[in-house]
Image: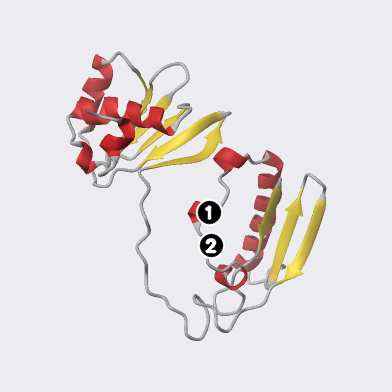
Amino acid sequence: TTGSSTSIIPGKTPCLECFQPSLKDEEMPKCGTEGVHPSILTTISSVQVSEAVKIITGQEPNLANKLFLADIKNLDYDKVRIIKQSKCNVCGVNADLSTKKSRRKLIEDICGREGKSVHIVSPKDNLEIDLDELNKIIVDKKLNIIRRGQLGITIQYNEQITISIVDSGVSIIVGALEEKRALEIFNEIIINGLNITPEKIDSEFKRLVQIN
């Protein structure tokens, strides 16, 4: 039920690192587990659109050097001043702008859709899936194809679960209650169906799915 927003102008205003240093995605609460009230999304996005219009039209945004805070549960709204840090690692005088390789996650639980859990499976390698071959497997398994495009296919696995698969192998599985179940479905269709070695997915894949 809470949200925040600021307008960052490079070289002029504080950057995210200035007032929220060393944020780590893996330590942040996920909307898939914490839940998000739809109204806070509307509130924050409306503020952000208004700020974007000001910037595009050459006006000074209201949230330059300020952080807007909203709590719709208690109907509290506030603005606090934020300060550009001269020693900031990102925008300061001696900023370190070297890129760091992010740690890839095999599977991640993201924001739910229509009350259903959503998992994204991201293989280590680009699988370069032949969508025509995948289409044959789907037909053989008597699964329904919801839609097909040049880069991927969305199928109805059962009444509760849908799967969107792009040709790189990245798959979005909606409706599987647990990560293990999502990986089992991925294993059934991608690994077994297309005869792809688990090592192309992740070195830990066999252990996570307990493949013999």
Establish if 51 lies above or below 39: below
Residue farthest to the top, as pictured: 142
Q: Is residue 88 left or right of residue 183?
A: right
| Residue displayed at 37% across by 74% down | 98
Answer left or right for 34 relative to 144. right
**Distance from Cα at disc 1 to Cα at disc 2:** 8 Å
Q: Residue at x 27, y 47 (%)?
A: 124
Q: Looking at the picture, which amino acid does disc 2 mark?
A: Leu
Q: Are marks 1 and 2 in contact (CB under 8 Å)?
A: yes
From the image, tell me which residue sits under label 1: 27
Lateral position of residue 115 relative to residue 153, left or right: right
Q: Which residue is mark 2?
A: 23
Tag 1 secondary structure: helix
Vertically, is 105 above or below 183? below
Estimate how packed mark 1 is, as few (under 14), some (14 to 19) or many (20 or more) residues with alpha carbons within 10 Å: few
Please identify the quarter of the rendering in which residue 157 is found: top left
Q: Judging from the image, what secondary structure is the residue with disc 2 in?
A: loop
Of 11 and 81, the residue lying toward us: 81
Instruction: State the image coordinates of residue 11 (x, y, percent, origin top left).
Output: 55, 79
Q: Residue 127: horizontal and vertical position, in percent?
A: 22, 41
Q: The N terminus appears in which quarter of the rendering?
A: top right
Query: Is residue 193 in view?
Result: yes
Residue found at the far right of this picture: 75
Q: Residue furthest bottom?
A: 93
Question: On the image, which quarter does residue 193 sit in?
Answer: top left
Disc 1 marks a residue whose amino acid type is Glu
Residue at x-position 37% and y-position 69%: 99
- The quarter of the image holding the C terminus is top left
- Residue 156 vertical position relative to residue 195 in the rendered view, above or below: above
Which quadrant holds residue 186?
top left
Which label sits in the foreground, 1 or 2? 1
Q: How is the model colour-coded?
A: secondary structure
